[in-house]
Every structure is written in structure tokens, then in C-alpha cells.
Image (tube, rainbow, N blue to C red):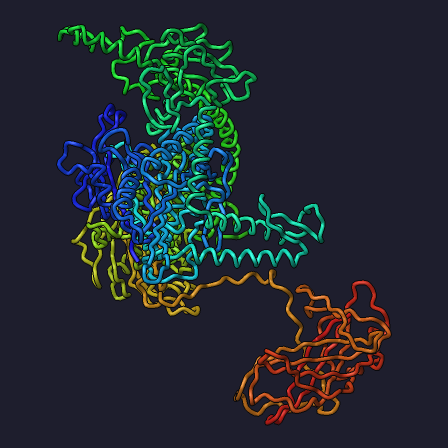
Amino acid sequence: MSSVKVAVRVRPFNNRETSRDCKCIIEMAGYTTSITNPKLPPNVKDATKSFNFDYSYWSQNPSDPNFASQTMVYRDIGEEMLQHAFEGYNVCIFAYGQTGAGKSYTMMGRQEEEGQEGIIPLICKDLFHRIRSTTSDELQYSVEVSYMEIYCERVRDLLNPKNKGNLRVREHPLLGPYVEDLSKLAVTTYQNIHDLIDEGNKARTVAATNMNETSSRSHAVFTIFFTQKRLDEMTQLTTEKVSKISLVDLAGSERADSTGAKGTRLKEGANINKSLTTLGKVISGLAEMSASKKKKKGDFIPYRDSVLTWLLRENLGGNSKTAMIAAISPADINYDETLSTLRYADRAKQIVCKAIVNEDANAKLIRELKEEIQRLRDLLKAEGIVVQEGDDGVKMLKDGDEKPNIPSSMIAEEAVDQLQASEKLIAELNETWEEKLKRTEEIRIQREAVFAEMGVAVKEDGDTVGVFSPQKTPHLVNLNEDPFMSECLIYYIKEGVTRVGSAESKITQDIRLCGSYIQREHCRFENSNGVVTLIPIKGALCYVNGRELTDPIVLKTGSRVILGKNHVFRFNHPEQVRERREHKNKIEVTAENIKEITTKPEKSSPAETPINNEYVDWNFAQIELLEKQGIDLKQDMKLKLNALEEQFKKDKETADQIFEEQRKNYEARIDALQKQVEEQSMTMSMYSSYTPDDFVQEEDIFVNPLFDAECNWTDKEYQLVLTTCRKWKYHQFTSLRDDLWGNAVFLKEANAISVELKKKVQFQFTLLTDTLYSPLPLDFLADDDDIDRPFPRTYVAIEVLDTKNGATHYWTLDKLKQRLELMREMYQNEAEISPTSPDFNIEAITGGDPFYDRFPWFRLIGRAFIYLSNLMYPVPLIHKVSIVNEKGDVKGYLRVAIQAVSEDETSDNSCGVRQFAKISFNDKDLLGRLSGKKNTDIIERIVTGKSSNKGDEIEADGDSGHGDSSISSEIKDEELPTHLLISKDFTFRVTLLQAVGVPDEYADIFCQFNFLHRHDDAFSTEPVKNCGKGTPVGFYHVQNITVPVTKSFIEYIKTQPIVFEVFGHYQKHPLHNDAKQDSTFIRQPPRRMLPPSIPISLPVRSPKFGVLPSLCTSHIHAKYDLLVWFEICELGPDGDYVPCVVDHSEDLPCRGLFMLHQGLQRRIRITVVHETAPELRWKEIRELVVGRIRNIPQSEDDDTDNSVLSLGLFPGEYLEIPGEDRCMFRFEAAWDSSLHNSVLLNRISTGGEHIFMTISAYLELENCGCPAIITKDLSMV
């Protein structure tokens, strides 16, 4: 076993990259190839990626001392693979890379230049050199070649003109995948192979031009079949070694967006990408299989998904020595394609092939093929088809008829097809070498005839078709988008008239072209005395040097001729070139003349050739055509962009109109809902602070005293306020829309990365508003400018659902973007690291997880609000208020006492006062609230232990104006009660008594309370253990607060509440010990959603046993679950008792309704099923009692029931069912319903009436003193 040899070769900059001043991003050191990301700073960790390969060839700069030439590449790869071929192994070399990366140059090279030959010419040349040097009487060699092209999943033979259609790819159980009818031509010299490659390229070029494609859009496979025959002198036996050398030139791997492909070219790219994608899947699958070292059941290699991988199956991970050459570009503009190629090669390096020597393959193959043919003949004979062998292949005769008939079954058709394929293969294997040479010569003559018929030039001697330059005759040379397909075809312009047209013309055309824009008679060339004139036919598309022809024109050597849309040529006239060269030698050109010529090239005639013909290629001709036709690509692109912008504006205006209508509808609905919620919230808040004595009448509950303080606006003021409110809402909704649309892409990316990295986290948009019960998180605290808003501001937030830890967090949009950067880095580090990278270090990339947040040890259970209005009167109140969480669920109740404290109590600390605080309200806050501006108060708070210290005071900010209502007039001193005098100290006490009904999932409970304007400073209790099970949590915390009476204080206790917040330690916290046990609380559905309960009646009293005695002990020895079937069987026409039909429904009281027939004999059958146990053994059925006949589900359990009937029993039996390990006991009893003497059973039931009865079975158990009783209520109709 050996792994695939992988080499990487970087080419020099091309003209396009040089004109753009591209930078080199490839570095090679030894076997390591490094690529630098041009979009990242050089000092970033991920800016450079490195890969190790078997060979790294630096061919970027020919002047570099480490430059890798064609000879060096062949010496490392080609010679090794050729040696494997001589040893008898199959060999494969394939090149991969984007178009223009140098694949074809590496594989084919430039054969007309010395030292520029590629791997294919050099390996063929070296093959025949070694054959000549080692051939002897004992060792003989034979070589055959085939050349095919795979384009859009279709296979085309490039060497045989008869195979014009697409060849069929088949799979033989002995040979594996192969191409049916693909020509294999015998060759004896290197020149033969050279000519065949040239002819194949010509056929490929002609077909490509006719189909408007290029070689970069197709795969080419050149295969050499190399046979060695060795004669053993001692045994006089001949052994054979057959090697197959597959040389593959893959299509370009560039992306569609980088090439600008559209239409048909885009579809071609899709088919090619399908082949390359499948090849990538195959390579990845083989690499993973090689890494695991043992095949798993789930491993599947998708060879059959494309023709390319199907044919290369043996070369990829099979019986082959394989080498891959990855061709890459050094330019920074091709970074993505180059990185993809390097990753492709990195995966291929891990593939392990199992090559074996192909020795004596033909003898074994011929024998097995003969056996298969005989098997197929026998199969056809069994179908009644007599098969005879003729000159034209297989001939079928049925039942002795003379006329062939079509097989009558699909099996026969498949057998005939397989038989024909096998006979073709055995005929090919039995063909002698002389017959192969003769067939090769016949195909060559046919090929030359086809080229000559198309007008393609052959050498004057007519022996072969090759790449040459005629010395005297003017001619046309083809130009192609692919440089390796340019100048492959030469068309002579003979003396006189040369006609050009399609093959469908009635008049024979000298040069035949194909295509939708080629007319039957397109144009003609007139060659008179060395002067060639192009005469276009009316309506034909003919261009010379970019100008469309309507009149004849004299051609000069180097002129660019375009016929139709796809056929591009360069006109060459050897005599004119010779005359120009001789004329140039006679003229002495000074330095000034040279400078003038080089600086003013635009003065030359458009019909003349540039000084250097090498620069006249396909791109030159196409750009010239566009310029002369007046097509400005930049202007055309600008017009298209303007049209797209206009269309976008129209679509945006339409969308805005629709959105405006929807916004108005939603605003109206939101206004109504918001008004309703505010009224309910305000009413419930006031109701929670009142005592039962405050509600004298029922309607007083719905009276809100806050409404008395509303301002009486005029109509003008009302309209002004309404306009302002609407304008504010408009801006609010616009900002929400922009936030949602602008950040949707980040949310989608975060969810995608979470799924890829298998994080149990989901992200979704949510809207947060600051309310009393759901305050905003710290990250969403409002700015100072948002304090005076008439409504709370709505924020767009990200709800983070952490399903792993069972928690929910809220992120701001900025936090999402920051975390997304870390998520991208984590994803990139995990996805892009190559296991063969020399600097691979998993330790360097590990860090914090951006998907999760830290969890607070204590979690907010809920909030409660208590108003201080009772302090206006010296009346103590004990409030029981609901603890409501942010979702509106009640999590318990809080008992708090609010009372005023007299001066005597204030000085007495014996009552257990723990804390004392002094708070001052500033009167300026009252004026600030009336003016709508924010002001600050000063709060002085003193916290002591068991004794108060009035000397330690801390000043803090005061009320910030978050009141729910405003006052209508100034507060006057004479209106104040006697205990609340301005500038006098007033002390009141807040006592936290108990918390009731707090869920037991919260352990340590504590409560803190504060005024609305002071969120930072709060009065807190000590944590108290929550025992659960309804036990109240006792705080018994007392807090005395002294306040200098001001108008601000009076206003606060009249209109504002105190906030109580209850916290608890969440026992399911990830750090808690109980978190290891995953206990999920499932909320039961309401009782009305449950099905009706099954009525359970007492057993029917047995006439034999009477009343059974009660158990004398509650000790349970054993407990078993029984499954009991009740069946009512009726006598059928055949004399058997058949169970009647039961209507099953969850809505029925007994879950089932027996459908009985009137006047038939019946039996009741009972089957008891339970787990097998030695203690549970049924001894005897003592009695089966039926009674309590009624038409309602409920049973009265009346002891005086006259309908009780003891049924006649049949012996019980144990059932034995194969495969059933449970114990099944069945017994029956005869039931005559008329013996009950019940009118309900003796007549037909009326519509909708159901009859109920109770059945009790008394069964005797072994080792049990009392019988077991099974009771069930049955319903019937």
C-alpha cells in the first residue's frame, strides 16, 4: 500500500495579473507551501496557512535559483510513475486547479519549444526510449493509446471520427468501469503518439468551436495501455504484464462568480463543478477511510455520482499508483481559489492505494469472459431464444423462425445486451497485433478524410496532420480562448476561389464550419497572384480587424478574421512576411525612429498586423471587435446599474406604502391594548394597598383615586399632545424596524454557527420595555434623555435560550455583535485547521466560550408594590401582596406591616429594631416634577447594628420623578394632618413578616425593598431557608425610617409605592449539587381538559360468599399489576361464539360500548394477563356475578338489588402463546340476560340510551386465604 503522491506547482504572473500589480501570496520552503491572506494584517495569527506535500515546485520566477522546470517535474514524478508501469502497476497522473493555473502546461507543455514539453510527451518519449533499449527475443512490448473527453457528463472519442455521438459508460464485473466502443489505437513510435495527441486536440478544438466551449470546460483523459510479454526459455511459456497509464487533465475549478459565467456557460460550469465536487467527496471519503484504518458500515464512496469518478475508480484508492499535481496561481486576487486547491490537495495526500502487479491478466480474463458468454447463451436458450453468431454480431432466432424477433422479457433484453458487450470485449482481447495496426491505419485514413472534408490543412505529403507552418501558401490559423487550443487548426487559401460555409450547402464548400451564425454560403476567399481578397455573402457576419464587412477587402498578414460569432482566425501570408522582413533589413532605423514608432503605435493601419504577432490572440481579437463596434463596456455597465437603482427605488416606495398602512393598523391596536393594560395595572395596584374597610360598596373597588388628579386640558392642548404622541410613536416604530432589518443577518449567522458547533443555544429577537414588574437588565438602562418620555421606551434585544443550562439571558445588539466576532473566530479555528499543518496547535486556539453567560447565584423571584397612603392617617396596616415575576405569574405572597411610629417608640430599642435610616426629600423635586424636568433629592441613610448611631449619615440622590401621577395644586400646611407637619421629623416602620407560597425550587430566600427613585440603595433582610411544602418563610425584619416632612415626601406617600424584590437561590443552578439530577416540572392540564373518570363500583355481593371479612393487617407481601380483557360473545350462524363489536372512545364513561344484538345466546369471556410469578397462581374460579342493571353510569351499591345473577362457569385454562413470556388465564360463563328480569335488557335500547351493569369475578389463589375479586362496570346498547 502507498499513499497518493501530491505535488503543488505555482506558475508565474500572467498579463492580467501583471497589469493589476498583483502581489505574490505563495511561499515555498522545502516540502511546505504557505499562503498568506491579503485581507488580513500580516501579524495576525490566521493570516498565513501552511501545508506539507510530497513536492512543492516554485515555478513563479525563471530567474530564481530554486525555479522548477518541466524537466525537474518530470524527473520527480514522471520517471517514478513510468518505472511503476514497467513493474506492472497501473499508473495515474492528474492535474487539478483553476483555469489558467498551469494544468495543461504541466501535462502537455509546448512541444514546439525545446525544454517546454510536459509530462505526457516526456513520459511517452521516455517510454519508447526504454522499449528500444530493452527489447529482445525474450522480451517484447506493445503500446496502445486512447484519448477521450468528458464534457457535461458525456464521453466523446477524440481519435475515431466514426464515434461522433456520446459513448456509453458501462461496468463489467471483471474489467470494472469502461467506455464502450472507445478506440484503442496501436502505436510503435513516439511520433505516432505525438501525432495522435495533435489529432485529438484538433478534434477537440473543432468540437469546442462548434459548441461554443473551451477546453477548460471539459476533462481530457489520455490512456496508454502498456503490455510486456516475456518468454521463459526453460518452460517456453509466455507471461504478460499489462499496465494502464492514465494521464488526466481536469477542467478548471474556478467559481462562477469569479469568471462572470452566465447562461449556457453557467450550466456547463454547474456540470463541471458536479464532477469536481463528486471528486472532492470521493477524495474526502477515501481520506477518512484511510485515517480510520478500518471500514465502517456507514462508509460509502460516491463513485457513481459522476462519469469522471466512475472511470477513475481504480485510480483513486484502488489498484493504481497515483500522483496529483495541484496547479496554483501566485496572485492575491485568486486567494480563495488557491486556498481551495491547497485544501483539495491536502485531503488527497491522505488517500492510500492498494496497487498490485497486473500479471497474466489477459489469459484469465479471456477464460472468464468465455464462461460468462456461455452462461448468457444458456439463459437466452431457457427463454426460448436461439442465439447464433454472425458477422454483424449477435443474431436471435426464436422457435426456429427465420426472422429475428424481439425478446419477450426484460431478462432476455438485458442478457442480449450483456452478451453483445462481452463478445466485443473478447473480440478485442483476441485481436492480434497486426490486426490492431491495420485497424489503426484505417482509422487514421478516415480521420484525415474528415479533416480534409472540413477544410483543415494536412501536410503537402498527405501522410499526417500536425502542427506546422506552411512556407508559401496563405492560410487561416484558429484562435481560441484556451491558449492550448489556439493555432491547432490550419485552413489553406488555395489559388483561385476558396468557399466557406456550412455542410448543409448545396454547393460544395472548401472550408466547412458549424454554428448557428454560419450560413450555408458564408463568404469566399479569392487568391490571385498572391493577393487574398475576402468577399462576404450578403447577410453573413464577417469581421476583419474588428470591423464588420459589407464590401470585399484585401487581407494582410496578421489580420484578425471573425466568421459568425465563435470562429476566430488569424490570416497568415508567408510571402508578405518574407517581403516585409527583406524590406526591413534594407532600412537603417535610427534611435529616434525607433522611439517614434514605439510611442505612436495608434497611427498604424487597422488592417495591418502588430509588429509582434505573438500578442495577437483570442482576447486581442475580441477586445478589438468590441471597440470597433462602439461598445463601451463601462458605459454599458453604468446604464445597467442605473436601471437597477431605478427599479430598486420603485420597489422600495411600494414596500414603504404597504408598511405605512400596516403600521397604522398596528398602532391603533397597540393603543387600545396599552390603554387597557394600564387601566388594569393601575386598578390592581391600588386595590392591593387597600384594606377591606375601605370598600364600603362593591362599586368602590373600580374607583381609582388617581383619576382625580388628571389635568383638565383644552381641546387645543389635547390636539397638541395627541400630535406629539403620534410623532413619537412613528419614530419609535421606525427605529424598531431598522434595528430588526439591520441585525437580522447577525442573528441568522449566530444561529447557524451555534448549529454547526453543536451548541445548545438559540438566538431570537425580542422586545423589552421597562415596567414595574419587568425592569430592564443593566445593559438596557435608559439614558438621562429618556427619563421624561411619556411612555416607556421599547428596546430590541436578543433573547438567548440556553437549553444546556436551562437559562434565559438578554443581550443588547452591540453585545451580540461583539460575541459574534468571537463565534466567528471559534468557528474558523475549528473548521480551517489542517491536521498536517506544521504549526498546528490546538492549545493556542482554545479560549472562553462566547455562547454562554455567567449565572447569578441568586435569581429574582418576583416583585411586589405597597403604597404608603395609610401613613397619612395614624392607622397601621398589614398588607398581603402578590409576588409577581416578569412574565406575570404569581410566585407567592408577601406579608408586610406599614405603620407610623410615635416619638416614645422611636427612642425605645427594646422592640427589636435592627436597622435605622434617615431619608430627606427635597422640595425642589416637587417643582421639578411639575415642570417635567429631572431633579435630584438627597437621601441620608444610616445603617446600624443593634443600636442606632445618628452621627453617621450618608448622603445620596433622591427621587428622580418616576411617579405614576402628578398633583393638581400646591400642598397647603393647613391641609396636613397633625403628625405630618412641615420640617418636623416623621418616623414610620416597615416590618417584613413572611413570604408564603414561594416555590421550593428556590432555597435561600431574602427580600429587599427601596423607594422608586433609589434603585442603588436598598434595605435587605438576611437569607432565610425555604422549607417548601407550604411552610411560610419568616423574615420578621423591622426597619425604622425617619424622614423630615417635606412637600415632596407628602406627595410620594400619597402617590408612589415602595418596591419589594424577593430573591432566592435557584437550586437548578449549574453550580448547584442538585443540578446533576434533571427534574423537569410538567404542568398538569386543567381538569376540564381531562377525559371523564372511569366509574369504580364496589364488588357485587356473592350469593355464595356473602360479605367478605376485612383484612386484619395492612402488611403487603407482594403486589402485581393485572391486565384484564372483558368480552361478550354471541352465538353465530356457524355455531361458534364470536366477540361482539365494541365502540372505543375516551368520551364514554366506561371507555367502551358493547354493541349487542337482541335475542341471541351470549357468553362472557374474561382473560387475565400478568407477569409470571411463583406467588401468583390461579387455583379456581369460584363465582362470576352480574348485577346492578341501570341506565346511568353511577352505581347505588344497593344490597337489595334483585337483578344479581350468578353465572354458570366453564373450566378455566392457561393460554400458551409462542414468544409470550407473560402468564395468560382465561375463563368463560354462560349469560342469559332474560334471567335478570330487567326491562332494560329485555327490550331494544332507545336512541342515545346506554345500559350499564357491574360484573365481579371471585377467583381463588394458591396460598391465599381470601379470594381475589375483579370488578368492572360495563356499558352496552
Residue 623, image x, y percentages:
35, 17
Residue 739, image x, y percentages:
38, 36
Q: Horizontal placement of 795 versus 17: left or right?
A: right
* Residue 578, picture quadrant: top left
Q: Horizontal placement of 427 versus 475: left or right?
A: right
Q: Horizontal placement of 606 versus 664: left or right?
A: left
Quick one: 1071 or 194, which is closer to the camera?
Answer: 194
Residue 479, image x, y percentages:
36, 22
Q: Is residue 789 above or below residue 761?
A: above
* Residue 1225, picture quadrant: bottom right
Q: Horizontal placement of 549 versus 1152: left or right?
A: left
Quick one: 649 or 1186, which is closer to the camera?
Answer: 649
Quick one: 1048 or 151, which is closer to the camera?
Answer: 151
Which residue shows up at 36% across the image and 44% down it?
A: 143
Residue 457, image x, y percentages:
40, 22
* Residue 436, picture quadrant: top left
Which residue shows up at 45% across the image and 8% down it?
A: 535
